[in-house]
Image (spheres, rainbow, N blue to C red):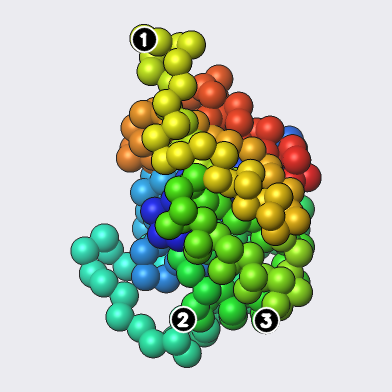
Amino acid sequence: GKGGVGKSTVAVNLALALREMGARVGLMDADVYGPSLPLLTGVTGRPQTREKRILPHQGYGLKLMSMGFFVDDSSPVIWRGPMVHGLIRQFLTDVEWGELDYLVVDMPPGTGDAALTLTQQAPLAGAVIVTTANDLSLVDARKGLAMFQKVEVPVLGIVENMSYFVPPDLPDRKYWIFGKGGGARVAKELGVDFLGEVPIDARVVEGGDIGKPILAYAPDSPPAIALREIAEKLV
């Protein structure tokens, strides 16, 4: 999907929801230029190696790997396509993931090198498109969906993030800030499942900024409940 729609937040929390169900889960951050996994999980530092194998970090019961573990926050990654291809391949083949039930891959925005490399190198079980309800975001959702269909990766469905806002002092009110029903409309139009809506909640941001995903930070909050229901549909 598009940059800024919350792909990383959704990926981290879906991985956590799968872990809560008792699955063995790895989470791989495939965004080379803007890795966000260290911030969202609070896990930092260079991973250890053993016999030329990279040992993934552990956090919240997940095995984690990200370019963000190898660079500091202030240094930009200035790489061309072949280098991105090499890194994604290394994360898939040289990391000691062990036995996993699921490897959740947080994709970078768009349909560039990292996305294509993943579709070629990994036997992907399926893709999840993350969007907001507004048209600008939905344009990119359509493109991502078309790319996965072209490379014959099943699209498991669409998640609409930041769907609506419920003020804490007015719990019976809903404000559809980015428009209403865009994700469901596109899912129907393109013939894929609509997996659900995740509401806007300040606690998602608060938790994310201190390395606590919403499922851990506020497990009974509406976004956490919505993300668990989405994970169940995915399974």
**Residue 67 percent coordinates (x, y):** 42, 67
Say which amino acid is labelled 3. Answer: Gln
Q: Which is more toward the observer, 116 or 47?
A: 116
Q: Label 2: how many residues lie within 10 Å, few (<14), some (14-19) or many (20+)?
A: some
At numbered mark 1, what does the secondary structure look like: helix, strand or loop? Answer: loop
At numbered mark 3, what does the secondary structure look like: helix, strand or loop? Answer: helix
Counting residues from the N terminus, which is met first, the one under dot 3 or under dot 2?
A: 2
Which residue is disc 3 drawn over?
A: 120
**Residue 197 percent coordinates (x, y):** 58, 36
Q: Residue at x 56, y 29 (%)?
A: 224
Q: Label 3: how many residues lie within 10 Å, few (<14), some (14-19) or many (20+)?
A: few
Say which amino acid is labelled 1. Answer: Asp
| Left or right: residue 12 compared with residue 234 | left
Which residue is disc 2 drawn over?
A: 84
**Residue 183 percent coordinates (x, y):** 58, 46
At numbered mark 2, what does the secondary structure look like: helix, strand or loop? Answer: helix
Counting residues from the N terminus, which is met first, the one under dot 2 or under dot 1?
A: 2
Counting residues from the N terminus, which is met first, the one under dot 1 or under dot 3?
A: 3
Which residue is disc 1 drawn over?
A: 169
Q: Residue furthest bottom?
A: 82
Q: Label 1: how many residues lie within 10 Å, few (<14), some (14-19) or many (20+)?
A: few
Q: CA distance from mark 1 to mark 3?
A: 49 Å
Say which amino acid is labelled 2. Answer: Val
Q: Which is more toward the observer, 94 or 225?
A: 225
Q: Which is more toward the observer, 204 or 151?
A: 151
